[in-house]
Image (cartoon, rainbow, N blue to C red):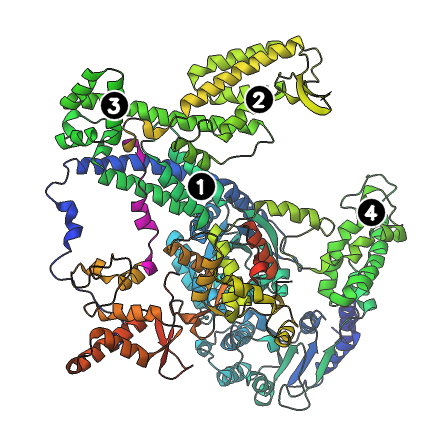
Amino acid sequence: MLPDELLTILNDQYPCRELQLRQLAALYAPSLPSPSAVVAHGLEATGKSSIIKDFLKSSRIPHAIVDSRECITGRHLLERTASAVDALQNFGDGELNAPLHSRTENISALAVHLHRLLEGAGRFVLVFDGIDRQREAPPTLLPALARFGEVIPNLSIIFIIQVPSPRLLHSPGVPHIFFAPYTRDQAIRILSTDPPSIFLELPSPSAEYTDDLAAEDNAWLWTRFLGVVWDSLAKGAARDIVSFRSVALKLWRPFVQPIVDGTFGTRDFSRLMVHRRTLFQSEAALLDSIIPKDPVSTATARSAAKNTTHDLPYYSKYLLCAAYLASYNPARQDPIYFMKATDKRRRKRGGGTALSRSKNRKIPRHLLTPSPFPLERLLAIFRAIVPHAVPQSADIYTQIATLASLRLLLRSGVGGGDALDASCKWRVNFGWDFVTGLGRSVGFEVAEFLAGGGE
Amino acid sequence: MEHQKCYLFKPQGGRPAKRRRLNNSDLPSSWPLREATYNELWATQEKRIKDVLSEVNRTTTGEITSFVSASATESRTSAYKIPTGLVVAGPSIASHRTLFEHLGREIVAQTRSAFVLLTSAECPNLKTLLKNLIKNATARSTEEDEDDEVAGNASQKGPKLLTYDLQLLYLWFRIQDLDQLVVAFQDSEAFDGSLLGEAIELLRFWSDRTPFVLLFGIATTVETFENKLPRAAKRCIEGQKFDVTQADEILERVLHAAIDGDDVPLRLGPALSTQLLDRQKDHVQSVDAFVEGLKYAYMSHFYANPLSLLLRKDLKFEQMSGDDFEAVRNLGSFRELAERLLDNGEAALVRSLLDSDAALFNYTRGQLDEGQLKVSSMVGALETLNVLRGCFPKMPVIPLSSLYVRAVSGELNGSPAVRELLISVKKASSDIFIQILDSLLAWTPEDAQSIVCSLRERLAALMESNEDCSTPLRSEHDLRNETLRTTVVAQKVELSKQKSALSKRDAAYSKLVDECHSRLEAYFAEMFINPQEIFLHEIFLYDLKSPHKDAFTPRPRYAVERALSAPQDYLGCDCCRPAAGNDGTESTLSSTQPATTIMYQLYLESGSLINVSDLWSAFQAIMGDDDDEQGLTMALFQRALAELRCLGLIKSSRKKTDHVAKLAWKGL
């Protein structure tokens, strides 16, 4: 296939990427030698991987793509690279390459393997997708891979990364292809190629409203709708094409609901806009949630869900309150708040030196990170705040262990490994709202015991 | 003491004497029979409870299973999200394991999927998580299908793969005849948020080849779980929430299974059931713990009480020994019975019961059945009470557990719960009254059916004569039939209630209601007797708290503290006893006590930082300052200090030189 025809097809498939495709075509022109390393960079969802994949595929350059997201360790990446190249080469000449069944333990081994595999073969392109996000990558991985082209003359490597640093590959003169983020018009143009339909099923199968008409209406409304979504929400919070599309799709059904109900016609865009403006004012559509929520009726759904909450045992709630107090009250003020026989001192609570108080109170305590406390202090506060005597049974410790495995309490600090060590420190892992609700359910007002009053 | 990791305890001369009590010669001969009785009776009881438990979770399990099978048909487009079930299972994490294992079996049996269960303990990082995922999935198949050669071939084709490579899972999955792979994270709270996020993203990446379904066990709330996940991971999954039946509801149903029915041999007494139920509410929400408590009650009753033999239905006279009959005669309830009989002038019966074992045997058999019947009909009456209360929409629902506790302690007769119901019945309008009669028909024993039926028929006749059916009939006690009248007498306003004139039909209806009311009142008064007054209640009601306390709520810290502060109780020697003038409440220090306990007393008296030199001089003063033995005293001192450190009470402190820091306070 001629490169020009190829480019036209790819341009149709990937709108707004002419420049990048021309650069690729120039770098990998069949008549010219290709560079040993190329960096393709650009932010998330700018079409890097798919364009390069489709370009290589349709220009019939032998290539292998290794996706770093699938590789758990650096070693894993090397193994996969070797086996990917191996599979491809063997597929070509049909004979089994026995030595490769040995392990590819480090980069040098990979270089040797590749060298042997690609010896005498034609041009070969190896694509490392997302290699900057490789887990447990050795520090020399990128520069070493960039030098493979020097050792293996017919190998060309493409690195697909998000943001390149100036000295990423430790070698000068590597061509970079920049995939710029899409602008507003580009994004809308790309998404408007595939409009969703207004009517899930056509209102009446009469001849008046045909499929063609419906498709035309869909496209007309969808394009305008996309513009509104971009200006109101996506511009600030969902600029890449994938999240833009997901936000738009999330809002689409509630947006066109009045049309489906028959309140408005399909072309009453401005009236529809005014009617459904709340959709674009709330930011509910931007929040990701595992359970799909209707952006209109979140409030009612939430109140319904409250009915079936599982309750913690009575003493667990007090333990959590005590843990919160232990985390957010300074230890030296414990006698003021929790000792039962110090009425005189308690009255002096407002006193102290005015200077230090005002300094301390600049930031409300509950906005700071919780400070670690020893378990002994938690138990002491627990006994002080529970209104009646608690037996010293093992059930209390069981509950602490349960709360720890629920990650409501965390072990922290140096003694973190051993829970039996008395010097082990603990920390709470929940916030002010949670603990007030918890305290109120057992009739305990946390704010009364919190230094600074919890305002 | 710390040069070795562990020490092997080799006891010399067999077990201590107090453990041998069971082998004493005077062990009741009925022991094997009682054990057999226990095994039989508990087996039936356990089966009932198990049936209830599997019934309880059936709806949730069914929902999840159908969700899994529905997700198999979903198309996998580029915007595909992994179908995910969030199983909100409540904070009793001990029961999650059973739930998920049950779920796994159901899913494998009913859908074409494989099921892998992951827990946080075995997945500290991504690599181990994947290793375990692959291992668990593939191991399952080789056990069941025995086609390991195919799996072996598949992995030998290419180069050998790393153990955490999901390619392995894919290769395995390809040769299985399965729709999808269900991965369940049992305790998702305990997983690290970022680890979970990475795993989800990775699985999402592979889900175009291996279709996954994820299940997360959640103990707190869905919101907490969502907040913990990274945003990118949240975008990869989509699904719905499944609520597991709440622990207290399951508890009610298990309790119901444990007390309801004529064939329940043994029931829990008031004190013990209060203790067990309070423990559930206050400490652990675990149905398993409750069932264990019930089992322990059965065990301790049958193993420790020779009279439990009487609960055996096919008991013969010869199987009981003379001692057993003596024991019956010594029961508190026997004495009460004897007094009652004597008051009624039945001295001959009492005499024969005291003299003849055979007469006593026959009499107790009859009385035991009667007593058990009384208690089981009392439980039946509880349900009637609850159902009737349910007919009135405004009446708060009282759980069966609290009603049972009140009933079994004999407090229910004339209690507010019953009174409130009876008053409401009096005031009920005819539409509610029909409901009441209908539910009574369903719940009353057969002998009372005819009464209810006749009431029902009379009401139906009355309703028919009522032309305008829109307004229900009202009884004379209904507030709407009363008017308040104000009169001014001697410049004071008087309020007086005035019954408005009743229509003829309403009057007839009122008669009906009054009859029902008085019958119900009599019924409840008859049913809600105090079970502790029934003869032989010691045999069919088990109400000992202390065995349960010892077995289920140990107090390790209290035990250590007590042993250290009162060694004389444990050592049983005279030398450590407190001085004669002291009545034992205040612990005194003397040189004869073990060195560690002396040190512990000194430790309790000091502040949070202890000067070791001061401690030494105090210790020396107690041990007696004999210059010759100073070396020995020093050795004791050092050992005591080391033991305190070994117990975790002190540690060396960097805050002050020559000081140790106090780590534990007494009584926490």
**Residue A54 occupies quadrant:** bottom right
On whether residue B549 falls in the magenta region, the answer is yes
Quadrant in which the C terminus of chain A appears: bottom right
Judging by the rendered image, the residue that carries numbered circle 4 is: A211
**Residue B616 occupies quadrant:** bottom left
Q: Amino acid at mark 4?
A: Asp
Sequence order check, earlier mark of 2 and 3: 3
Host chain of mark 4: A
Q: From mark 3 to mark 1, how far is it between C-alphas?
A: 40 Å
Specify the segment rendered in magenta: B539-558
Q: From mark 2 to mark 3, how far is it between C-alphas?
A: 45 Å
Q: Amino acid at mark 2?
A: Gln
Judging by the rendered image, the residue that carries numbered circle 2 is: B435
On the picture, is B627 further left or further right than A406? left
Q: Residues within 10 Å of mark 2 (few under 14, many from 20)?
A: some
Residue, x 38% and y 43% (percent of image)? B275
Q: Which mark is residue B251?
A: 1
Sequence order check, earlier mark of 3 and 1: 1
* Residue B45 location (% of width, % of height): 34, 36
Q: Nearer the viewer, mark 3 or mark 4?
A: 3
Main secondary structure along the magenta-highlighted residues: helix
* Residue B43 location (% of width, % of height): 31, 37
Asked if residue A428 can be seen in this view, the reply is no
Q: From mark 4 to mark 2, how far is it between C-alphas?
A: 57 Å
Whether label 3 touches label 1, CB < 8 Å: no
Host chain of mark 1: B
Q: Residues within 10 Å of mark 3 (few under 14, many from 20)?
A: some
